[in-house]
Structure formats: C-alpha cells, structure tokens
Image (tube, grey):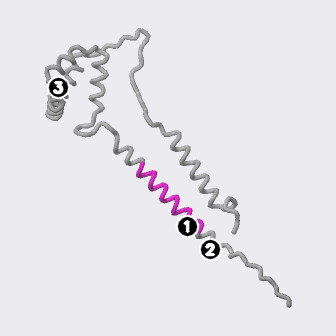
Amino acid sequence: MRNCRSTRWFAYNVIFMVGITFFLGVTPQNVVAGIIRSNDGKYIYDREQDIEKLKALLEKKIVQSKLLEYKIPPELVREKIDGISNEDLHILAAKIDQLPEGGDTANYNDAFELMLIGAITVIVLIVWIIYSFAKELGRSNPPQIPQESTQN
C-alpha cells in the first residue's frame, strides 16, 4: 500500500480543509454599523419620536405582562424613560427596531444553522475519506508474503 500522503485524495482533502478554514476565518462573526461622531461630537435626536417608539413597545400586552411578572409598575418605567438622556434614549429606541416581532432576541436559529452545516460537512468529509480509502484499497494489489523455501 502506498504512503497515504502520496495519494491524490490526500491533496484534495488538504485543499478542501484549507478552503473551509479560510472561509470560516474570513467570515465576520459580528458586524456592527453605527453612526460615527462628527467633529463637534453632538447628535441631534428626535426625542419625541424615540419616546413614542418606547411607549408603543410598552403598550404591547406581552411587554405589560412581563413587567407585571417582574413586579415593575408601568409608572416607574415611564418615569425612567422621561429621565433618560437623549443619547441613551436614542440607543434604546434603535435597539427596539432591531427586535424581532414576538421572537427571542438571541440568534439561536443562526447558531443552529451553522452547527447543522458543520455537522453535514463533517459527515460528508468522513464518507468521502472512507470512500477514497475503499477505492484506493481496491486498486492496489495486496502485499505478497514471501514464502520461505525449505531445503532439506
């Protein structure tokens, strides 16, 4: 049997693994875009519009039920909103726009999809390696065992 590094499938496997590693290495994990500060460092926020977004969120039944579940009175939440700075209020309102409707805020679906793709890739790679070995073993001649000559 030939050395496994000299076979063709080994080169294909190396190229495949390097490609996968490169792809996973250059794929951004978290991409964040935002407003950068201007020279004066001042933002102009529409405070009323941001407060309306927060109040619309607080009027939803699911949010009200969660607030009551955590024993937080809605009046306290409204007082806190009125006391928030413009910048923090705008950040909070921007986060509300990013929330999925009626869903969880964590990206468990993305993680599951990546794990599923990884598992399928590993399974395909294992099947490919086994197939390559079986094909290579079928091509090569079995080693011949030298017979000792008996001279009596």
Q: Is residue 10 rendered to the left or right of residue 20?
A: right
Which circle, 3 or 2, is nearer the viewer? 3
What residue did someone put label 3 on? 72
Residue 35 magenta-highlighted:
no
Residue 118 magenta-highlighted:
yes
- Element under label 3? loop
Above/below status of 145 relative to 24: below
Residue farthest along the front direction in this orientation: 152
Confirm or deny contact between disc 1 and disc 2 (CB under 8 A): no
- The quarter of the picture where the N terminus appears is bottom right
Residue 111, percent across and down? 39, 44
Residue 152, percent across and down? 86, 91
Residue 57, percent across and down? 19, 28
What residue did someone put label 2 on? 138
Residue at (73% x, 78% y) in the render? 144
Residue farthest along the bottom direction in this orientation: 152
- Sort mark 3 into few (<14), some (14-19) or many (20+) by Cα contacts within 10 Å: few
Earlier sequence position, callout 3 versus callout 2? 3
Q: Which residues are magenta?
A: 115-133
Q: Amino acid at mark 3?
A: Ile
What residue did someone put label 1 on? 131
